[in-house]
Image: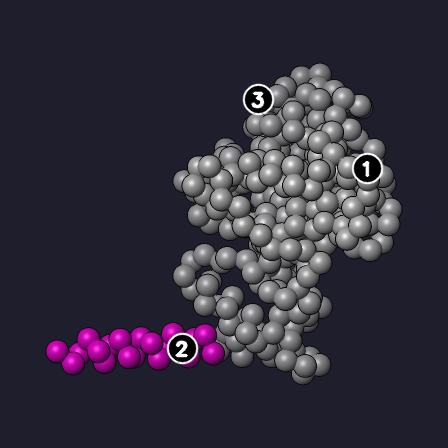
Amino acid sequence: MRVIPLLLLSLISVVATAKSLNTDRLMSKDTNKDGKLSKEELGEPFWQRTAGQDANGDGFLDATELQALLTKGSRGKVEQARPGGANIAFQVREFEATNGETLRYSLFIPVELSDTPLPLVLCLHGAGGNTDAANLLASTEQQKKHPCIVMAPACDGRSTRWAKSEFRSGEGHVVMPELIETLDAVIAETKADAARIYITGQSMGGIGTWGAIARHPQKFAAAIPVCGIWQTEDAGKMNGVAIWAFHGDQDDAVPVTGSRDMIAALKKAGVKPEPKYTEFPGVGHGSWGPAYEKAELWEWLFARRIGKP
């Protein structure tokens, strides 16, 4: 009868040792020995997957945040401390939809709301849990040029997904219904300009962006899907949404044909405005980097309005 307790104790010891090794391995990257790990120390790929665990939004992961990441990861699902990897300028909220599902999201509201309704940008993260667009748009520099409300919801990419796509389709719960309901609630609360609601997403979020404008084209004035893919037969449903898609021609995670085929299908369907497409030579899956760095992109986006090309 003592065998089971001994086995359990042995298992607990192994798990604890593994977690300690994982933490120690990560903390070995702490080059300046300050007890925290920065984006530079972790490297861009790992930071993209873990930035959502930066609970205090200071741009670093400390030992407590890393331990929480390892603990949650061992359960097969990572609940982001800050949805979308949003920084401390964002509020972290929850919304319970009428379907009974709860959506967590980060929300940036400019401190001084103008008398004129502001545009709202919905930023969908990739499978790693991070969206570069949210923090960029909430930055002081961008807010001076383009004041806006920024919303970055959470979708773990394992048990849930933004939209049901034929690409790597699975049985995960689709969060689109509660996402749109939450978006409507935020628009009403912040008195955002309903004619200037925009959406962008990278990777899994790029897929979600295509899915959102296929299901709810009347909701969005413009969309920026980055390294996404969608069913070409839905192209005609996107009429009226201004679209600028981006992809790297060396993408080995989401094939570049995903964007190429969608743009071709949109043009064949005669959707208006005519879509824009930028393909980056020699760039792999991280095409959101050069895409979001384009100042021209944001000038284009914030000039878009429902009913105006």
Residue furthest out toward the front: 115
Q: Element type at marker 1? A: loop
Report the amino acid beneath label 1.
Answer: Thr
- Which stretch appears magenta? 1-20
- Counting residues from the start of the chain, the first of labels 1 and 3 encountered is 1
Q: Nearer the viewer, mark 1 or mark 3?
A: 1
- Counting residues from the start of the chain, the first of labels 2 and 3 encountered is 2
Residue located beneath label 2 in the image: 16
Residue 33 against residue 50 in the figure, above or below: below
Q: CA distance from mark 2 to mark 1?
A: 55 Å
Q: CA distance from mark 2 to mark 3?
A: 50 Å
Residue located beneath label 3 in the image: 233
Which residue corresponds to the image point at 42% horizontal and 64% vertical from the top-left?
A: 74
The image shows residue 52 at horizontal and vertical percentages of 59, 59
Q: Is residue 40 magenta?
A: no
Disc 1 residue crowd, few under 14, some 14–19, many 20+, Cα 10 Å: few
Residue 229 against residue 66 in the figure, above or below: above
Q: Is residue 93 left or right of residue 266?
A: left
Q: Element type at marker 2? A: helix
Q: Is residue 14 magenta?
A: yes
The image shows residue 184 at horizontal and vertical percentages of 61, 35
